Image: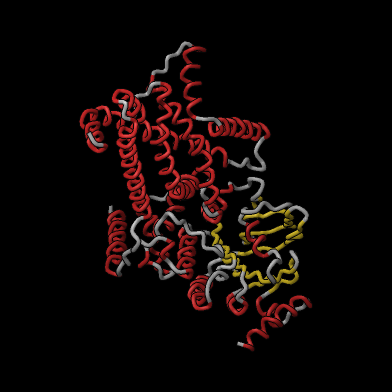
Amino acid sequence: MNEILKIEHLSKTFGNNVVLTDIDFEVKKGDVTSIIGASGSGKSTLLRCINLLETPTSGEVLFHGNKVAEGGIKEEDYRAKVGMVFQSFNLFNNHTVLSNCMLGQIKVLKRNKEEAKAQALKYLEKVGMAPYINAKPSQLSGGQKQRVAIARALAMDPEILLFDEPTSALDPETVGEVLDVMRTLAKEGTTMLVVTHEMSFARDISSHVVFMADGKIEEEGSSKDIFYNPQSARTKEFLTRFREDKQES
Amino acid sequence: MSFFQRMVYIVQTYSVSLLKGAGVTMAIAIICTALGCIIGLGVGIVQTIEPKKNSSPISKFFIKFFKTLLSIYVEFFRGTPMMLQAAFIFYGFSQLFGINLGMWKAAILIVSINTGAYMAETVRGGILSVDIGQTEGAKAIGMNHFQTMTSIILPQAFRLIMPQIGNNLIINIKDTCVLSIIGTVELFFTFKSISGALYTYFEAASVTLIIYFILTFSCSKIMRYFEKKMDGPANFDLATTDTLAYTSGMNLAHIATRERL
């Protein structure tokens, strides 16, 4: 049993609004899973349910077989092991870049300052943000912020990284610098679950692709299967649009 | 004597009383603004606590009960004149309980709880206006509610409400004048004594006005300075490869030494 995350019959409703219906899938160690689909198909909500930022209406999130919602594992411990990168970065505005990457290690993992600093520098160097350790988030560009956010998540030594549309708030120029970092991570075998609109990126780095429509998993499979041999009509239609976009550009 | 000569005469004759009055006014204003901030912080934090969905009905009830009590406090002290509250508390305590609070204690008590009532709403607003993403970012790396509040939300909320704290300080400097009703000898009381003794309302008022203005203006400048200081430097130094290599080298050396031991 080497699956890190397992989602079982997960549903989420906001009032009368059904956002997710009966979602089932799992993430194994080393997998890079992309969740694609139109806006409003429930991709981000799914990711937020996995990290308990939203409480699922029904169904289970299992982490190494432990039910997360019912206290099978402490909420804080679980979140420390599941890193999250947000669309809007969510760096701590009152802390410097270095402190952003150290805070969680010190407060949550109870590491000492030196260890936390060494770890933070290691990952900041990896994402190319080491020279900016003294900067405040407000002094950085979007792409730089997102790279720091990735370093912050990595510094916690998570078992899996969740990315919630990490490049959607960036301009086309800076999208590349963030995707490059993510590509490197994928190559190194980091387990990743990525919600994205960057289709060619999803196609190239994913081992597994989940296509969502109307709050349901319409189709899932290997990157090759989904992108080159989709079975469902919805998937075909969605991907045709992506191909047309590509030809235009 | 001309108008200005009379003003000079007042300043010369009553300089000690005026300085004492100004001192008392400032002392009450600063102490009470500080205490009021602490009260407001406490009340404001409680007001923003949302009971968890899975918490027990008892704790839900207590949270609701405390919140109601606190909003009664806020509404009452915001909604009635401080001058009447002063009379009510000062004379009420001595008549009902036989406790003579004394001028200082009464003054500080009244102005603090008043400021606290206003600050509670300010703090609540400050906490609510910190982007929800900050909380989510902190939760996502496993920080609990307390850690999130103390390291992320409150420092940012505090910066947001700094102008409002300055506002309250200035309001308090001026509003301590209503304490003359319970006999606090502050700046306004001094003005009344001088004008009564010399029968020169206009001149005494002019002198006192100027003193009030100097006090409030300096305070607003000082508060601005603190705000700037909290924002930190506008620029940052890029860490050069040298310094980075130096620090990481240090760490390596450190680890190496530790391993050798």
| Foreground of the two, A162 or B87 | B87
Q: Is residue B17 above or below residue B225?
A: above
- Quarter of the image for residue A205 reads bottom right
Residue drawn 51% across the image and 49% down it:
B143
Quadrant placement of the C terminus of chain A: bottom right
Query: Which percent across, then down, holds residue B70?
Result: 57, 32
Q: Nearer the viewer, residue A23 or B113?
A: B113
Q: Is residue A198 above or below residue A160?
A: below
- In the picture, measured across the screen, residue A198 lies left or right of residue B143, that is right
Q: Extreme left residue here?
A: B12
Q: Residue furthest front?
A: B1
Image position of A146 (left or right of A73): left
Q: Name the spot of residue A66 as percent of width and height, x first.
A: 64, 51
Can you say which quadrant of the picture contains the N terminus of chain A? bottom right
Left or right position of A218 against B261: right
Residue sitting at x 54%, y 43%:
B124
Q: Position of residue A150 (x, y in %)?
A: 49, 64
Q: Is residue A148 left or right of residue B129?
A: left
**Can residue A81 be seen in this snapshot?**
no
Residue at left 74%, top 69%? A213
User: Based on the displayed image, in which of its 4 quarters is residue B10 positioned?
Assistant: top left
Above or below: residue B24 compared with residue A102: above
Q: Position of residue B160 (x, y in %)?
A: 46, 50
Is B108 rendered above or below residue A126?
A: above
* Residue A237 quadrant: bottom right
In the image, A84 versus B131, the foreground residue is: B131
Report the residue at 74% width, 72% height from top.
Answer: A219
